[in-house]
Amino acid sequence: FPGAATGSGGEIRDEGATGRGAKPKAGLTGFTVSNLQIPGFEQPWEVPYGKPERIVTALDIMIEGPLGGAAFNNEFGRPALTGYFRTFEQSITTPRGEEVRGYHKPIMLAGGMGNIRAEHVQKAEITVGSKLIVLGGPAMLIGLGGGAASSMATGASSADLDFASVQRENPEMERRCQEVIDRCWQLGDKNPISFIHDVGAGGLSNAFPELVNDGERGGRFELRNIPNDEPGMAPHEIWSNESQERYVMAVGVADFER
């Protein structure tokens, strides 16, 4: 549930952080998993090959995952209009012998559509002295290593990393962030946002360097100024946690005062 919910939430942030701010309008969710093996309704092609102990079944994923994606979209205030669902699991012969291929580690696809004003499609220049802002929820020790974990083969990481990399969703906070972004782009030519980036894999350690690099600037970051619900975190945990519902943006000094 939380993995699919934050999948949809991350896609919403991708839309909202397009250009100098945009409006998410509608979403889709999709899932690819291994055979469901529904008790009492097993299909002829479904062979009980087994699964790693620390992951849930494909059936559990398809019960909870779509609910998580739909719930986040609904609570944010955006309809999830479409999606897809596929299963695949098969034993094949390889040079190393028989192997079972499937999606015990599922694919969750989140997509959507939105709209943006023509004058806000391109990022603006980050002027010297611009304020670098974290918009959204506080830093928490969740989702640490999630970007790396999502790209690993099942079993290639430790169980501790697998569980530490699961995020938690807060669609109300994301809606509040979107309201701020909406108020900014609705100002038209007076939009104070010169550059905006969503916070995803890698947390602020990825988002802030990307923002200043793409803006061809440098930056000074004060980790202790970052909103933080867990003050005991080490610097690398503050910098790299993947707490959800956050954006980073650059706002010029004059616009910041305004």
Image (spheres, rainbow, N blue to C red):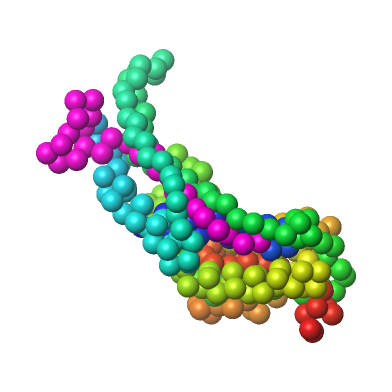
User: In x, y percent, where is residue 216?
Assistant: 84, 57
Q: Horizontally, is 31 left or right of 222 in the view?
A: left
Residue stretch in magenta: 22-48
Residue 206: in sight, yes or no? no
**Looking at the image, which residue is at 47% across and 45% down?**
109
**Looking at the image, which residue is at 39% across and 61% down?**
71
Q: 45 or 166, which lies in front?
A: 45
Position of 252 relative to 218 (above/below) = below
Image quarter hosting the C terminus: bottom right
Residue 101: in sight, yes or no? yes
User: In x, y percent, where is residue 197?
Assistant: 67, 61
User: In x, y percent, where is residue 97?
Assistant: 35, 18
Q: 228 or 108, which lies in front?
A: 108
Q: Residue furthest left?
A: 40
**Looking at the image, which residue is at 66% across and 79% down?**
225
Position of 184 relative to 152 (above/below) = below
User: In x, y percent, where is residue 237?
Assistant: 56, 67
Is 32 contained in the magenta span?
yes
Is 97 contained in the magenta span?
no
Q: Place residue 126 in its image quadrant.
A: bottom right
Q: Place residue 207 in its image quadrant.
A: bottom right
Position of 129 relative to 126 (above/below) = below
